[in-house]
Amino acid sequence: MCEVLELSGSGYYDWVNRPGSEKEKEDKKLLKEIKRVHKESHETYGVRRVTAQLNKEGIFCGKTRVGRLMRENNIYCKTRKKYKATTNSKHDYPIAPNLLE
C-alpha cells in the first residue's frame, strides 16, 4: 500500500502510532457528554437543545461543533409527528347527494 501511495513504511507506522491531538481528545470528552445529555432527554434533544443544556452545565461549546460530533456518530433526535384531523364532521353544510346509489 505504501508503494501505491508513494509513502515510506516508517512514515506510515509513525502516523498510525501517533497519539491523538488535543482537539481529538477534547472531542472524545465532549462526545461522552453529548451522549449523556441525549440519553437523559430520551433521545428527543437535537443540536440546539443539547448545546444549550451543555452550556447550562458549564461545558461551553458551539452548536456547530456539537452538530458535527452528533452527525459523525449518528446521534439524531426523535421527532414526533403531530396529529392532524383531516375530516370535519361537525358542520351544518349540505351533504352531496348519492348519485350512484
Image (cartoon, rainbow, N blue to C red):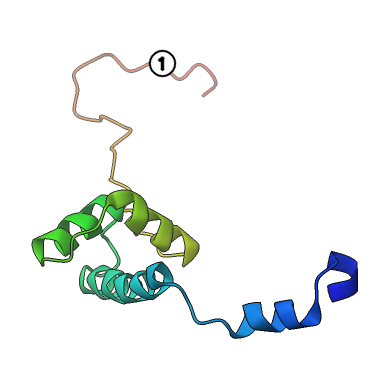
Instruction: Please determine whether, in this image, residue 79 is positioned above or below residue 5.
Output: above
Q: Nearer the viewer, residue 27 or 85?
A: 27
How far across and how far down the image is residue 17, in percent?
Answer: 60, 85
Image height check: is 67 above or below 40?
above
**Is any part of residue 62 visible from this angle?**
yes
Residue shown at the point (41%, 16%) measured from the top left: 97
Residue located 74% across and 83% down the image: 10
Estimate the x, y position of residue 72 in percent, counting from the top left. 49, 62
Looking at the picture, how far across and down is residue 91, in whole percent? 19, 22
Amino acid type at image mark 1 = Pro
Residue closest to the eye, 68 or 49: 68
Mark 1: few, some, or many residues within 10 Å (few <14, many ≥20)?
few
Query: Which residue is situated farthest in the right direction here?
Result: 3
Which quadrant of the figure has residue 90?
Answer: top left
Q: Quadrant of residue 89?
A: top left
What kind of element bears circle 1? loop
In the depicted structure, whether residue 79 falls above or below residue 4:
above
Q: Nearer the viewer, residue 77 or 79?
A: 77
The residue positioned 26% from the left and 29% from the top of the image is: 88
The answer to which of 52 and 10 lies nearer the viewer is 10
Residue of label 1:
97
User: Total of numbered circles in the picture?
Assistant: 1
Please determine whether, in this image, residue 73 is positioned above or below residue 63.
below
Q: Position of residue 2 (x, y in %)?
A: 84, 74
Locate the N terminus by quadrant: bottom right
